[in-house]
Amino acid sequence: MKKSDTPDSGFTLTDNQTGKTWKFPGHTGAMGNRLVDIRPMYSTSGLLTYDPGFTSTAACKSDITYIDGEKGILLHRGYPIEDLAEHSDYMDVCYLLLYGELPTPEQKASFDTEIRYHTWLHEQLARFYQGFMRSAHPMAIMVGVVGALSAFYHDSTDISDPEQRQLAAHRIIAKMPNIGASAFKYSLGRPFPIPINKYTYAENLLQMMFSNPSEEYKINPVLAKAIDRLLILHADHEQNASTSTVRLAGSSGANPYACIASGIASLWGPAHGGANEAVLNMLDEIGTVKNIKKYIAKAHDKDDSFRLMGFGHRVYKNYDPRAKVMQKSCHEVLTTLGIDDPRLELAMRLEEIALSDDYFLEKKLFPNVDFYSGIVMKALGFPESMFTVMFAIGRTVGWIAHWREMLGDGDQKIGRPRQMYTGYKKRKYKPVSNRGHTQNKISWSWLWRGKKNGTTASEG
Ligand code: SDX
């Protein structure tokens, strides 16, 4: 936030119980949003802030991506996502996210080549895959394999060396499609894929996923473009859960491969990158248009755990601009392939009904990037289990860009949040001889039933 990091007149906090006041510096972000700098708060007032989920907390400064949730705006280094999706390719966007500017033709050619010559996986890694069941979820394999890369590439784990940071960044971006496609091929019992240097990043991903080594594989340019666009739409999204995980892991000085593996693990959750797979499962569960109203009612019901997957967002309180582009891509791919997927019709009717539903309007729940992406990936031939793998491949450049930015930020230190303690005060130790005896049958469910309804675990 170099452009506007001049502290302004700041803010005053008053303790209504004691009348004491404290002054805190203010900052104004590049888009005019003001922030309270609470770094001196604990040392000057002994007070902590409470913000589980970081709904009102900026954990860092960043120049990479800007989201205006109210207006549904997404900019990468100032460029609207719609323009990048329309006019750029994924390598263009990777360069932009990593280095801050769209590449010149020479920079782009050199970057393309650099990435292309890091797409191979060490032959020994194949044995790593063989440790997994063939039925293992590809995300479980991806977390393990990416974390293990630090054991293969000791020449790029020293984060204090800019050259090693750069090499690790390029290696991880280059290898993710191969790692993901290898997990898919391993699940089928087929030979591991080999990247082919004449192909673009998206074309290579397509051929590594779907080619058969015994036959010549023809790249369908419409499908390659759809995959390239899908990767652009997933490339970065400021401080989402997985990116924040990568930043937190990186703040301890962990090597880049371990940090990216932590981001993959976080992305896997159904509330985050796992939502695309959950959307398809939800559409299959809803089945037909006539069931939509029943499921919308379930989404309203506080006592029902059902949520409309692919809807809602922590930041967007308007339509996710990526979802609009994804919906268009959906139509293009299904038309090109001549696929009539009833789930698209169902998804569009579901969106139409949800967007006129008072509950969804009141809570500002709109389709997000995951709502249509699953239908596109299904049409492209990806099994549901590979949807979040595709998300991870696209998001890797965002994770790396934030990891690099975090390492270069003088304000950054190891992330170590505080807490609001709600447990026992200090109490006298009880030897086992005087802890009484358990009368009823021991059931381990009390271990986790504990605090859910306000009772402590032992009373559960
Ligand atoms: C991604 O952060 C990012 O940028 C993420 C991402 C990225 O690119 O990295 O954009 C990718 O993760 C997109 C989101 C994918 N997840 C889903 O589609 C899962 C379904 N949506 C949610 O579970 C939810 O909307 C979240 C997790 C996305 C956001 O949750 P928040 O911001 O914590 O909001 P919340 O859970 O507090 O919900 C606010 C209210 C609640 O009701 P009240 O308690 O206020 O009465 O809205 C309700 C929720 O019950 N609500 C939903 C809902 N999402 C929120 N009700 C029904 N269906 C939903 N989908």
Image (tube, rainbow, N blue to C red):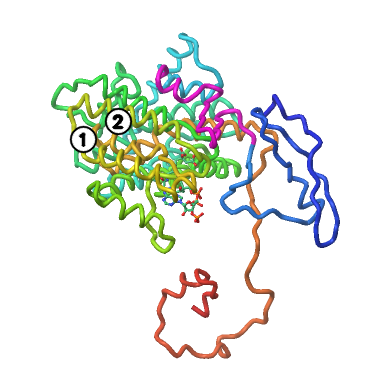
Q: What stretch is highlighted in magenta?
A: 61-89
Numbered mark located on residue 330 in the image: 2
> Which amino acid, mark 1?
Pro
Whether residue 132 is visible: no
For marks 2 and 1, give the CA distance: 30 Å
Earlier residue among tags 2 and 1: 1
Residue 223 placement (x, y as % from top left)? 26, 25
Q: Name the residue under label 1.
A: 191
Q: Residue drawn 69% across and 34% down?
A: 410
Question: Is residue 205 visible to us here?
Answer: yes
Name the mark nearer the viewer: 2 or 1: 2
Mark 2 and mark 1 residues within 8 Å of each other at the beta carbon: no
Which image quarter holds the N terminus?
Answer: top right
Indicate whether residue 63 is drawn in magenta: yes
Instruction: Point out the residue furthest to the left here.
Output: 214
Label 2: which secondary element: helix
The structure residue drawn at horizontal position 37% and vertical position 25%, both measured from the top left corner, is 229
Which element is circle 1 on? loop
